[in-house]
Image (cartoon, helix red, strand yellow):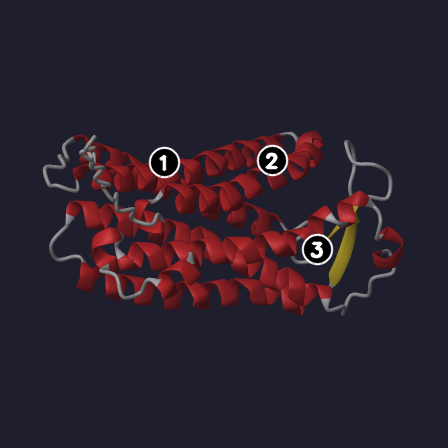
């Protein structure tokens, strides 16, 4: 999407898609992709037990603690930029005329604040020791994941993370509801009404695709608090929800949003019948 935008930067971008909606989407998905890559290194690959012999002798001052800190930092950033994406989306709908300057300042302030808060929240993982934790049923023997002593057994960290994710989910639900309410009374009366309606539909479904994994994750996390025996199943299911959140959203947005489709111009071909007079 970024390459497509750079190649078509001369086009009137703001009429196709709001620039700050697009920028926020890139930040949101970019942080989500990095978070997913780190998830492979800390959770998915170690859970297969193929690297257990190597990580079983992990030292407390290992570089793993820095990786865990970055992992949590991009997790926070991904969620914060998701809230910003939904907020700017709703702001554009409710204030269609004077939203560009407002969105600019909101994007800058929110971005700086998000990076600072995520960095501060990740520091405790660096100051604590790295560790590997063995997984229970339904994983095979030797399966593990990598974390820090700050994340493991820290009730405050667990409750704080749950409350943060819960508030993010509530914010997404509220703003999605506001968007749906506004769209019901919105009529497209211009010549490009079909294209505009397609754009709004894509953004709406994108927000729903973001919302569904977030809700399911909260349900699973809430269940694991009161039933620890299901914690292993939560770890098993979370990669599926994470992949849906990152990959499906990006693919759907790119494949369906009209801006990323080339405008085709139909060329009419005139066929003329030529008759020749034959003289006997």
Confirm whether residue 206 shows in the render: yes
Inter-mark Cα distance, 3 to 1: 31 Å
Marks 2, 3: nearer the viewer: 3
Q: Which residue is mark 3?
A: 41
In depth, the one of 135 and 158 nearer the eye is: 135
Above-or-below relation of 246 to 220: below
Residue beneath disc 2: 225
Q: Where residue 188 appears, x then y in whole percent?
A: 14, 37
Which residue is found at the position 44% from the left and 68% from the top?
116
**Quarter of the figure that contains the C terminus:** top left
Image quarter for residue 227? top right
Residue 9 shown left or right of residue 35 in the figure: left
Secondary structure under the numbered disc 2 in the rendered image: helix
Residues at badges 2 and 3 in contact (C-beta under 8 Å)? no
Between 161 and 258, the residue placed more toward the observer is 258
Left or right of residue 52, residue 84 in this image: left
The Cα–Cα distance between marks 2 and 3, rounded to whole angstroms, is 25 Å
Q: Which residue is mark 1?
A: 205
The mark nearer the N terminus, 2 or 3, is 3
């Amino acid at each position: 999407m970024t390459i497509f935008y750079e190649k078509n930067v001369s086009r009137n971008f703001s009429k196709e898609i709001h620039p700050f909606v697009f920028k926020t989407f890139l930040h949101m998905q970019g942080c989500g992709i990095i978070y997913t890559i780190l998830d492979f290194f800390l959770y998915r690959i170690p859970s297969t037990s193929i690297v257990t012999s190597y990580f079983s002798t992990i030292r407390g001052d290992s570089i793993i603690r820095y990786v865990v800190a970055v992992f949590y930092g991009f997790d926070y950033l991904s969620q914060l930029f998701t809230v910003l994406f939904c907020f700017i989306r709703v702001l554009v709908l409710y204030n269609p005329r004077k939203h560009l300057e407002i969105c600019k300042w909101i994007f800058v302030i929110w971005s700086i604040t998000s990076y600072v808060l995520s960095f501060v929240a990740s520091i405790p993982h660096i100051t604590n020791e790295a560790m590997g934790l063995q997984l229970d049923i339904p994983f095979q023997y030797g399966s593990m994941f990598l974390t820090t002593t700050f994340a493991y057994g820290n009730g405050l960290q667990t409750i704080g993370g749950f409350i943060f994710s819960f508030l993010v989910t509530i914010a997404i639900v509220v703003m999605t509801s506001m968007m749906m309410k506004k769209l019901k009374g919105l009529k497209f009366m211009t010549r490009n009404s079909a294209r505009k309606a397609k754009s709004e539909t894509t953004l709406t479904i994108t927000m729903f695709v973001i919302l569904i994994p977030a809700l399911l994750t909260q349900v699973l996390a809430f269940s694991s608090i009161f039933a620890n025996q299901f914690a292993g199943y939560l770890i098993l299911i979370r990669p599926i929800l994470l992949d849906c959140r990152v990959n499906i959203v990006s693919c759907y947005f790119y494949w369906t949003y009209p801006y990323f489709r080339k405008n085709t111009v139909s060329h009419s071909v005139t066929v003329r019948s030529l008759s020749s007079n034959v003289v006997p």
